[in-house]
Image (cartoon, coloured by chain):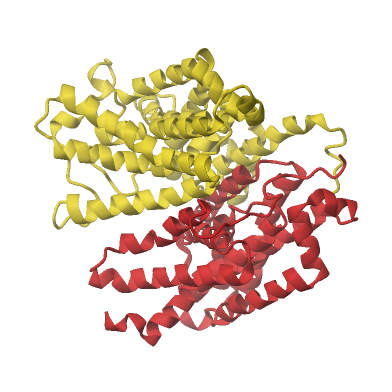
Chain colours: A yellow, B red
Amino acid sequence: MLAAFVVGGILVALLGDDPIETYQLLLGSAVSWPDGIGYTLFYATPLIFTGLAVAVALRAGLLNIGAEGQLYAAAFITAWVGITFPQLSPWLLVPLAGLAAVAGGAVWGGIPGLLKARFGAHEVITTIMMNFIAVALAGYFTQYHYKKPGDPILQTVEMGANARIARLGRFVPGLPERIPLNLSFLLALAACLGVYLLLWKTKWGYALRATGANPGAAEYGGISTARQIVIAMALSGGLAGMVAINDVLGYRYRYYDGFSAGYGFTGIAVALLGRNHPAGVLVAALFFGALLRGGLFVDIFTEHVSKDLVQVLQGIIILFVAAEELFRRGVRGPGRLRGKV
Amino acid sequence: MRNLLSLEMVFSSIRLTTPLLLAALGGLYSERSGVINIALEGLMLAGAFTAAVVTHFAGSAWIGLLAAIAAGVVVALLHALACIRYRADQVVSGMAINILLLGVPALLSGAFFDSTGATPQIPRVSLLPNVPIVLAFAMVPITWYVLYRTRFGLRLRAVGENPEAADTAGIGVARLRYLAVALSGALAAIGGAYLSTGQSSLFTRNMSAGRGFIALAALIFGKWRPVQTMLACLLFGCAEALSIQMQGVARVPVQFIQIIPYVLTIVVLAGFIGHSRAPRALGTPYDEKR
């Protein structure tokens, strides 16, 4: 983690900017009130959902690289519900659209789960493929059926006022409503708690973790691992789908092609850094949220370094955490480091 | 519809197949040795960016190509180091490389050229000729020969199927895997270089646009065998050419043609069309000292 920042800092220095100053910009701009904190929490919201999604799957021994596709599928279906039933009361329409988000993600995640459980198709490859399919299909429906005629941007028409959830600025004094932080942040916090209770306090969560920890033993103990795989992937997809609640119902009020700034992939970093635990995921998501916010400032105020630094840092962090993760696992065998290179 | 089968369409398909084929053959070496290479996308981006930058400064696409190969090998060795020495999860490491290589070119082009991820236009005269196309298709029989008729190929396959046995027989498992992954970096980077300095004349942000993943799909679709992989790449290349050709016509929405490779891969993986079996030791690190 620290090492990742050192490597990033060297890179910044090589590009001709002061690394300390850059990092001050990167992290310092995230804690000012209200803009810094407001935007950091807003950027953290989708990452909490995708981080939880990846973590739940990893707990079951599955790597869900498809959170990106799951949240795209969810976002389109959510916008579709919002556009198709504009006359419903917000008390009915918002929950309906939210359920559609979860269901859309769950289906898109459940399919690779089913393919794995039934046919042994590797979930990493199938979820990558499902990512492309989701974006293409949502693009097709948007372009041919739900776009405002003549709109050069690939996006659906806007949803009515009944399909929107309130921004937190309405309830929090001092937080202006222009900051898109909305109620779904609270949903994200609830999701952290929910995942924790589900995984560690229920029999069902135990079965899921057992499947990931030792599938052979789980099967021997009477757990249907095939079923757990499908459930875990659907749950993972459903959590990823909640990103749509933040983006479609709380921010853009429409499906917008390419809206996700790689939330699904950053979710992998969030889950790894958070050690696949909801509390860790929350902290890691806030950290990455701050980085995303700070990245904008780095873009503006440094001479050479752009906000892409955040992406680079993210890659380095994943690489280091992944290698370190297996440092620990590898401790079993002596002479691990002496392995011939 | 009549010009769908025209000569132009054939050439277009071959041009679009080339980067896929190079990356897929690269992936073949890596995966046959037992190292999952989901980083093909990042390796292509490394090659494409390096080629464009070096060609811009050196004025020669050949130097750019060499630099791209070097960059591909370096990045691939990073992946290999994480996977082989530090026994990192190969998929996670590959994803990290992909994310890293999405950021690094953007960061560097911002610093070098003050742009948001693109490199300056390269004059037409200093672009790569069609050499990568020839190379890509020539690599198919070469790979076949290397894999099935040479000692190196036999050892490569042995390491990917049963590293314990290979180790017992005195084969350096780690060394061979490093070599295979480096080779995949070189080939994928040539594919990337062809994208930026052959097919177009500059690097743009995320210019590989998922081709690394399609190459991976082709590799699986081709059951990790050179000739079948080439056929899969041709199929996907044709699909891409077709979708470009159809853009104006739009009788069938382009999106439906674009998803063909992805749907096919899922269908194949699920075992609906024949059975695709991965090298047995794919994805498992090997500890020689145990």
Q: Is residue B285 left or right of residue A166?
A: right
Residue B28 percent coordinates (x, y) = 64, 62
Residue at the location (65% across, 45% down)? B90
- Specify the quadrant that holds the N terminus of chain B: bottom left
**Count of numbered marks:** 0
- Specify the quadrant that holds the C terminus of chain B: top right
Residue at the location (30% across, 31% down)? A245
Q: Is residue A110 left or right of residue B244?
A: right
Q: Is residue A296 visible in this depiction of the protein?
A: no
Residue at the location (34% across, 54% down)? A136
Query: Please, which residue is most extreme toward the bottom here?
Result: B7
A199 to A231, vertically: above or below: above
Query: Please, which residue is most extreme toward the left here?
Result: A87
Query: Please, which residue is most extreme toward the top here?
Result: A201
Q: Is residue A32 visible in this depiction of the protein?
A: yes
Residue at the location (54% across, 82% down)? B130
Quick one: B134 or A174, which is closer to the camera? Answer: B134
Residue A137 percent coordinates (x, y) = 31, 52
B247 to B73, vertically: above or below: below
Residue B7 percent coordinates (x, y) = 39, 86
Q: Quadrant of residue B91?
A: top right
Q: Quadrant of residue A330?
A: top right
Q: Is residue B43 left or right of residue B267?
A: right
Residue A276 percent coordinates (x, y) = 56, 27
